[in-house]
Image: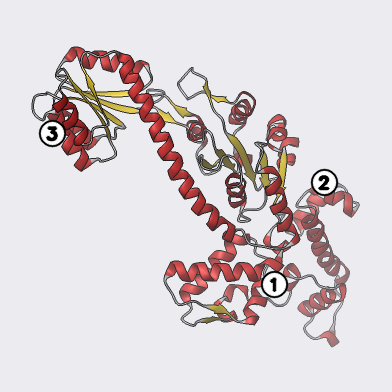
């Protein structure tokens, strides 16, 4: 974290004026106090990164104020000023916890040097803190990204190949497939480990606020901008920024993201200074960006700049062999977090969980396990603890199981004619045809990851015909 807001306390108006003018010219937000009591009031009510205090002031002296600061806000950096260059003052100030001590009169370069020294020290402290946290997160991450299916092994290989470089990565997958976990894995295995990893969900922030979140703003840029704020790109400088759900980003902001990729600099809202940033971008989406490009809803040039290395996360229903391992992990995690005795699943429960299609993917599975752990009083979880996943019967089976043609015909006829010996005239052909078309179209759409152009080509029908069929048959199109 760099110095942003500074308090200057001195009973001499000329000293306050000189320091405030010099510091504000450097881009700092500065508040002024005429004596120790006013300074204490400001410190109690406002967040400051640094305080520059005169040692002799009416009310509380600089040293007395320093003692109060150590009690109230031990992380506030204090610089003591004095016109008396005595060893006693210097020793006393440093002994009480001052960051530095300067003697009046002084050159303004001295203040610049102190601020620069503070920034470097804080940057190093911040890096150590980040590194400690990320090493812990990396250890947790290695246990959290779970799966030995062929699809996941390919993802692991890609992470290993792209992590050492700075290429832009586009992660695509349905909601709940773990896109942010993959982004973190790329960061933790890169040379940027120890630098910030900043995540931003572009769909979760109103359009009118998204720009200032990304690029920051200057004091007075708009109503409510009472001080300068660094955007996510500046916060991520030296590290990685993860732009989740980038497909929801407005096109005017897409152009600015493209500029960051090309020029490696940002401009805060309300400012005119270009600020250099060294940031790796990892983007993610659950939408078909290629289709959005065709529909002119997403910039083509930005798509190609983001899609340097694509990573496709398959839905959980396409890697069901990973479900037992995921269940074990989420069981242990839920029991540990909730402080309950360790629970297990019965063999038939694993089968039930593995048969479910999990439209919400890994996130839905985790929440389902946690709910069962909370509600069940038994140590062994059975099918009864997962009532929403019980096997469905009748016509609903057609939507959730891959049935043979004979099975589809049998289910449809029995649903229409409970007594098969007394079948009456009916449009059986149309009914059965509809039931054959639904799983066929759903199967092809799943294999093409929701790409309707490719699906129509495989089925040998016109794309408009396919769209009409999807509507008529009530098929939900999931885009991986």
Q: Residue at x 15, y 31 (%)?
A: 63
Determine the residue located farthest toward the right in the rendered image: 460
In percent of width and height, residue 448 lies at 80, 52
Q: Residue at x 68, y 71 (%)?
A: 354
In percent of width and height, residue 338 lies at 43, 69
Report which residue position mark 3 lands on: 64
Report which residue position mark 2 lands on: 453
First of labels 3, 1 by sequence position: 3
Judging from the image, what secondary structure is the residue with disc 3 in? helix
Distance (Cα) linking label 3 and label 1: 70 Å
Nearer mark to the viewer, of 3 and 1: 3
Front residue of 16 and 467: 16
Q: Quadrant of residue 222?
A: top left
Q: Quadrant of the N terminus?
A: top left
Report which residue position mark 1 lands on: 355
Q: Residue at x 88, y 52 (%)?
A: 458
Judging from the image, what secondary structure is the residue with disc 1 in? helix
């Amino acid at each position: 974290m760099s110095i942003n807001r500074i308090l200057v306390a001195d009973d001499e108006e000329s000293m306050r004026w000189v320091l405030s003018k010099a510091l504000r010219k450097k881009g700092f937000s500065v508040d002024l106090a005429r004596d120790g009591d006013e300074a204490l009031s400001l410190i109690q009510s406002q967040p400051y990164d640094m305080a520059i205090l005169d040692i002799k002031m009416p009310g509380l002296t600089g040293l007395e104020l320093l003692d109060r600061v150590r009690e109230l806000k031990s992380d506030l950096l204090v610089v003591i000023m004095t016109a008396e260059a005595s060893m006693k003052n210097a020793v006393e100030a440093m002994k009480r916890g001052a960051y530095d001590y300067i003697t009046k009169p002084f050159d303004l370069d001295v203040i610049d040097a102190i601020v620069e020294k503070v920034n470097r020290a804080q940057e190093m402290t911040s890096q150590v803190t980040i590194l400690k946290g990320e090493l812990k997160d990396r250890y947790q991450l290695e246990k959290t990204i779970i799966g030995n299916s062929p699809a996941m092994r390919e993802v692991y290989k890609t992470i290993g190949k792209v992590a050492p470089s700075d290429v832009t990565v586009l992660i695509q997958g349905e909601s709940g497939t773990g896109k942010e976990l993959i982004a973190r894995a790329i960061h933790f295995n890169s040379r940027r480990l120890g630098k910030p990893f900043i995540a931003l969900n572009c769909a979760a922030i109103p359009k009118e606020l998204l720009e200032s979140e990304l690029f920051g703003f200057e004091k007075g840029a708009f109503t409510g901008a009472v001080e300068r704020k660094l955007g996510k790109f500046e916060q991520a400088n030296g590290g990685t920024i993860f732009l989740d759900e980038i497909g929801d980003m407005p096109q005017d902001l897409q152009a600015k993201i493209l500029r960051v990729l090309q020029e490696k600099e940002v401009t805060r809202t309300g400012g005119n200074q270009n600020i250099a940033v060294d940031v790796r971008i990892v983007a993610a989406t659950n939408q078909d960006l290629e289709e959005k490009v065709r529909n002119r809803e997403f910039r083509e040039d930005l798509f190609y700049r983001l899609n340097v290395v694509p990573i496709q996360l398959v839905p959980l229903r396409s890697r069901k062999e990973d479900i037992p391992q995921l269940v074990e992990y989420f069981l242990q995690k839920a029991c540990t977090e909730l402080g309950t005795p360790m629970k297990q699943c019965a063999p038939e429960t694993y089968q039930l969980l593995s048969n479910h299609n999990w439209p919400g993917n890994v996130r839905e599975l985790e929440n389902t396990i946690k709910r069962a752990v909370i509600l069940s009083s038994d140590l062994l979880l059975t099918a009864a603890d997962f009532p929403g996943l019980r096997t469905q019967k009748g016509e609903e089976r057609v939507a959730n199981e891959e049935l043979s043609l004979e099975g589809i015909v049998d289910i449809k006829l029995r649903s229409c004619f409970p007594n098969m010996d007394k079948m009456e005239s009916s449009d059986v052909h149309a009914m059965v045809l509809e039931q054959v078309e639904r799983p066929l179209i759903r199967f092809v759409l799943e294999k093409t990851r929701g790409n309707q152009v490719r699906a129509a080509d495989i089925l040998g029908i016109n794309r408009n015909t396919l769209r009409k069929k999807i509507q008529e048959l009530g098929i939900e199109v999931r885009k991986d």
